[in-house]
Image (cartoon, rainbow, N blue to C red):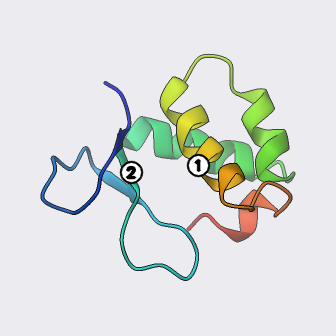
């Protein structure tokens, strides 16, 4: 099941909403497995760009992290952004 970029909350929620820092509206929804992968990789430290390079099998996680990179957060520590 693919992560879905959502224009508003009326779309189907797959379980976890992704939100850019300082924003209120989510930009994507993904499964708990994708979220858990991102959190697990963040525990090793590293920037969003570095963590994105470590993902080889989860296109949803790559898409979500790519959205952060596209919005200027590529050099931020991922551990600072995950809850």
Depth check: 17 or 26 in front? Answer: 26
Picture quadrant where residue 50 is located: top right
Quarter the C terminus occupies: bottom right
Q: CA distance from mark 2 to mark 1?
A: 9 Å
Q: Are marks 2 and 1 in contact (CB under 8 Å)?
A: yes
Q: Is residue 78 left or right of residue 50?
A: left
Q: Is residue 29 above or below residue 73?
A: above
- The x and y percentages for residue 12 are 15, 46
Give the labeled residue for mark 1.
67
Q: Of callouts 2 and 1, which one flags the residue occurring earlier in the amino acid sequence?
A: 2
Q: Check the image and report above or below for 63 versus 18.
A: above
29 horizontally vs 34: left or right: left
* Residue at image location 36% in from the left, 28% down from the top: 2
For image coordinates 87% across by 51% down, the residue present is 46
Q: Which mark is residue 42?
A: none
Find disc 2 in the rendering and name its residue. 28
Quarter containing the N terminus: top left
How crowded pointer 1 is (Cα within 10 Å; few <14, some 14-19, many 20+) is rated as some
| Number of dots carrying numbers | 2
- Secondary structure at badge 1 equals helix
Quarter residue 8 falls in: bottom left
Q: Is residue 37 left or right of residue 45?
A: left
Q: Is residue 69 above or below residue 59?
A: below
Count residues near mark 2 (Cα–Cα under 10 Å), then give few for <14, some for 14-19, many for 20+: many
Image spot of residue 16 (x, y percent): 35, 53
Query: Which residue is at the front of the view, 72 or 2?
Result: 72
Report helix, strand or loop for mark 2. strand
Above or below residue 23? Residue 8 is: above
Residue 72 is situated, as x and y percent measured from the top left of the image, at 74, 61
């Amino acid at each position: 099941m693919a992560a879905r970029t959502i224009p508003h909350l009326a779309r189907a929620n797959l379980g976890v909403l992704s939100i850019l820092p300082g924003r209120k509206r989510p930009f994507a929804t993904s499964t708990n497995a994708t979220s858990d992968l991102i959190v697990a990789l963040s525990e090793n430290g590293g920037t969003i760009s570095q963590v994105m390079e470590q993902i080889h099998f989860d296109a949803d996680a790559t898409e979500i992290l790519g959205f952060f990179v596209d919005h200027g957060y590529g050099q931020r520590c991922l551990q600072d952004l995950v809850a």
